[in-house]
Amino acid sequence: MQIPMVDLRIQYQQLKTEIDQALAAVLDSTQFILGSEVTAFEQEIAMFLGVRHAVGVASGTDALHLALLAAGVGPGDEVITSPFTFIATAEAIAYVGATPVFVDIDPQTFNIDPVKIAQAITSRTKVVLPVHLFGQPADLLPLQELCKKNGLLLVEDCAQSCGADYAGTMTGAWGDLGCFSFFPSKNLGCFGDGGLVTTNDDKLAEQLRVLRNHGSRERYHHAIIGVNSRLDSLQAAVLRVKLKQLERFNRQRRTNAHRYSQQLAALGIITPFEDGKGTHVYHQYTILVEDRELLQQALTAAGVSSAIYYPIPLHRQEVFADACAGLSLPVTEDVACRCLSLPIYPELNEEQIERVVEVIRKAANGQR
Ligand SMILES: *Cc1c(COP(=O)(O)O)cnc(C)c1O
């Protein structure tokens, strides 16, 4: 039995009739960029997330980039973020000419530690950019208070947390801006690249709509330099079908995660911690182990995929190494050495979970 990290085929097969019809309708319409399908999706997801505005863009990376541009972040500004995330989070900060300032994470949730942020704030700090890592919301209440107190903007990286709530309010509805990715393997994934920026601020929404479309409010009139980053209609059509299933998908991810945790905890493995402040939607199921290499070898030999998210923290990446020389973030560095993500997706079945656990149990006992 081969068990992959994700299986996108099962989900497509389940929804094939509806998705194919939606795609065919777009092809017939020949409206491919933005258009009514994108507008409908923006309205539906804004309603789902409980935000005033949702602006479709070309990727999650672009969502972060455009959010920072709309917020007026630029050279000389500092943006406080997590070092334990995908490169795109910090890349977007660098794109606008600002400086990422990395603050250590909480050892249990792996999310940025609000207590440690206070010491990192300077007169140049403009934004706090938490990542809701692996699908668990960062500690948004203290983050929001901290931002208010210090006059900072809160921009959420929700690429891994679509449909997760914190204290009953969705991620993406807490900050001044929320940034989502619809990369195929994300909790809400399209059939290519796609992204979204959310906001409750009418002015920021208007600015985002102009920025994503060459800085143009009216065709061939350009008041500012923007970018070409629009969601296309085919992706929006897929997303409209899948959005209706997202709550079910996320429930299934949670059920699967809890099945893993029950069995793995009995083996003495450190399983994902749920802080109980919101809903963890398990974009990844990530454990901490001492002999990661051995375990990964055993899993691979048994046909079970696994992955390391993330092996090198951002402050240790070549591109930021000089700027971060001397910066020590011990929790992140420790977690990066011990974390291992196991297969998790809504359609993963009980038998597959048993199989993964069995391989881990044998590896833990030094057997094959
Ligand atoms: C996937 C991801 C992104 C980037 O999204 P793309 O759509 O691939 O550009 C940004 N941040 C995090 C935390 C992600 O996981």
Image: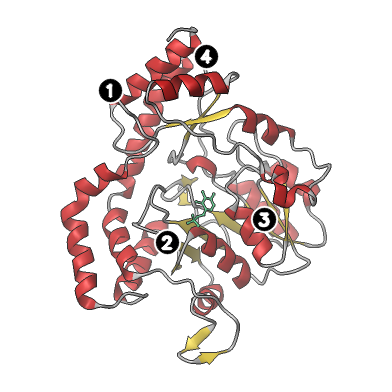
- Report the front residue among 106 and 139: 106
Disc 2/disc 4 C-alpha distance (Å): 39 Å
Residue at (49%, 86%) from the top-left corner? 217
For the point 42% across and 54% down, which residue is it? 183
The three-letter code of the residue at mark 2 reads Gly
Q: Nearer the viewer, mark 1 or mark 3?
A: 1
First in residue order: circle 4 vs circle 3:
3
Circles 4 and 3, Cβ within 8 Å, touching? The answer is no
Residue 117 place in picture, x, y as percent: 73, 47
Up/down of 89 relative to 366, above or below: below
- The mark closer to the camera, 3 or 2, is 2
Q: Cα distance, mark 1 to mark 4?
A: 21 Å
Under mark 4, the amino acid is Gly
Comes first in the chain, label 1 or label 4: 4
Which numbered disc, 1 or 3, marks the residue that appears first in the sequence?
A: 3
Q: Which residue is mark 1?
A: 351
Residue 234 visible from this viewpoint:
yes
Q: Which residue is mark 2?
A: 194
Quote the CA–CA distance across marks 1 and 3: 42 Å
Of labels 2 and 4, earlier in sequence is 2
**The residue under label 1 is which amino acid type?**
Glu
Tag 1 or tag 2, which sits nearer the N-term?
2
Q: Which residue is mark 3?
A: 128
